[in-house]
Image (cartoon, rainbow, N blue to C red):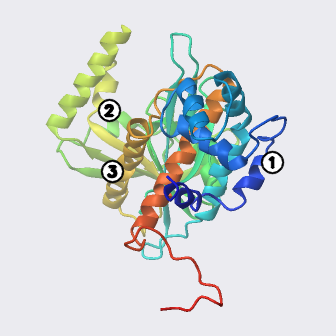
């Protein structure tokens, strides 16, 4: 531990101790004010998964802190802004440049929810952006799951000129597509046929069901130019790229739809079953750089962000939120994200780390080099 802890701290952001003071994490503490012992105690709970009672016992035996579990909970809540700042700092230091080979920066957007225990436990939504091909998270945001400004939306994310974004049907909204276009970025999103209005190039309603129903052979790709209207703004022009699924994939999708409808007591509309036979994407990607096939093929890698959530929920235990207070919930989630980001940083560093397990310290002038 005397070797491992200093090594782990070396991966912390610069000025991480100063952040503890500037965010108020140390304010009002009467004892055990050392920032290093403070965060080490927090990580026993957040990183190792020990209960608060076991955490304070281990911290006391290790000489890190002599506090009660109630006092520890108060410290966890006070650390909310500190932990958030640590996450932001790790994002800042890993500024990822565009992919030179491909000439564009690809980002995958998605969200997932975590829930406090019990029937009345509140839910929180994590909005997450993953860069391809590095598979590194470049942004996350925590919101409630109900109320204005909490849903899955492109406006939740910082979007830069030239970004090429891929998202699932939860983001299939005209307002979001217009938001991306206003940032001079590009988007590919799976179409939610019930929420996304579409017009043909002449401005008439686009007959989507009629068009896709003409595709009868599995693997056949078709595309059409369409307009996405929103309020009084000029419509956003793009392409619909559609491919018909295999019969087996269609059967599996229909079975899933029927199971969900049975659970909720709903009746499935005939057009829902027809749309389920296809993968329907709307894209503003440039046609001279991305063929219809390439748009559909790129969309397939969206599954990578789902795999990240699975890793977080299985390895970092992000799926279950053992807190019943907004501040403690946010602190716990920011702490989990900090741990996950540290793990990603460690893994990236491990590909180049020296075989003895740590970097050499830079020699001083009076230390001869062998």
Indicate which label's residue lies in the foreground, 2 or 1: 1
Distance from label 3 to label 1 (Cα)?
45 Å
Residue at position x 50%, y 47% in the image: 340
Indicate which label's residue lies in the foreground, 3 or 2: 3
How packed is label 1: few (under 14 Cα within 10 Å), some, or many (20 or more)?
few
**Secondary structure of residue under mark 1:** helix
- Residue under label 1, please give it: 21
**Is 225 drawn above or below residue 362 in the view shown?**
above
**Is 39 drawn above or below residue 66 in the view shown?**
below
- Which badge, 3 or 1, is on the more N-terminal residue? 1
Q: Nearer the viewer, residue 182 or 310?
A: 310
- Tell whether label 2 touches label 3 (CB within 8 Å): no
Q: Position of residue 270 (x, y in %)?
A: 30, 21
How packed is label 3: few (under 14 Cα within 10 Å), some, or many (20 or more)?
few
Distance from label 2 to label 1 (Cα)?
55 Å
Q: Position of residue 240 (x, y in %)?
A: 41, 49
Residue at position x 64%, y 33% in the image: 330
- Residue under label 2, please give it: 275
Q: Is residue 102 left or right of residue 220?
A: right
**Secondary structure of residue under mark 3:** helix
Residue at position x 56%, y 16% in the image: 121
């Amino acid at each position: 531990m005397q070797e491992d802890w200093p090594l782990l701290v070396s991966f912390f952001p610069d000025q991480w101790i100063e952040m503890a003071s500037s965010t108020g994490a140390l304010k009002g503490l009467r004892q055990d004010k050392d920032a290093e012992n403070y965060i080490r105690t927090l990580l026993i709970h957040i990183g190792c998964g020990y209960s608060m009672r076991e955490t304070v016992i281990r911290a006391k035996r290790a000489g890190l802190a002599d506090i009660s579990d109630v006092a520890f909970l108060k410290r966890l809540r006070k650390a909310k802004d500190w932990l958030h700042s640590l996450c932001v700092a790790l994002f800042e230091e890993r500024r990822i440049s565009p992919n030179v080979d491909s000439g564009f920066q690809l980002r995958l957007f998605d969200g997932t929810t975590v829930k406090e225990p019990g029937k009345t436990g509140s839910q929180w939504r994590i909005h997450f952006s993953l860069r391809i091909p590095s598979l590194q998270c470049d942004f996350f945001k925590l919101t409630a799951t109900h109320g204005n400004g909490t849903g899955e939306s492109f406006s939740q994310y910082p979007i830069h000129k030239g970004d090429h974004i891929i998202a699932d049907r939860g983001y299939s909204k005209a307002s979001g597509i217009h938001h991306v276009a206003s940032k001079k970025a590009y988007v590919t999103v799976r179409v939610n046929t019930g929420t996304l209005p579409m017009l043909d190039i002449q401005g008439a309603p686009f007959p989507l069901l009629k068009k896709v129903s003409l595709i009868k052979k599995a693997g056949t790709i078709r595309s059409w130019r369409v307009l996405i209207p929103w309020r009084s703004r000029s419509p956003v022009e793009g392409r619909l790229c559609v491919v018909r699924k295999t019969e087996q994939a269609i059967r599996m999708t229909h079975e899933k739809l029927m199971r969900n409808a049975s659970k909720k007591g709903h009746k499935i509309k005939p057009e829902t079953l027809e749309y389920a036979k296809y993968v329907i994407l709307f894209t503003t990607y440039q046609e001279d750089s991305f063929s219809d096939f390439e748009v559909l093929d790129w969309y397939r890698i969206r599954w990578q962000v789902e795999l990240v959530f699975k890793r977080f929920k299985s390895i970092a235990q992000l799926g279950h939120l053992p807190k019943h207070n907004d501040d403690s919930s946010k602190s716990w989630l920011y702490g989990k994200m900090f741990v996950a980001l540290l793990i990603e940083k460690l893994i990236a560093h491990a590909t180049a780390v020296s075989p003895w397990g740590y970097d050499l310290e830079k020699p001083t002038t009076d230390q001869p080099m062998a």
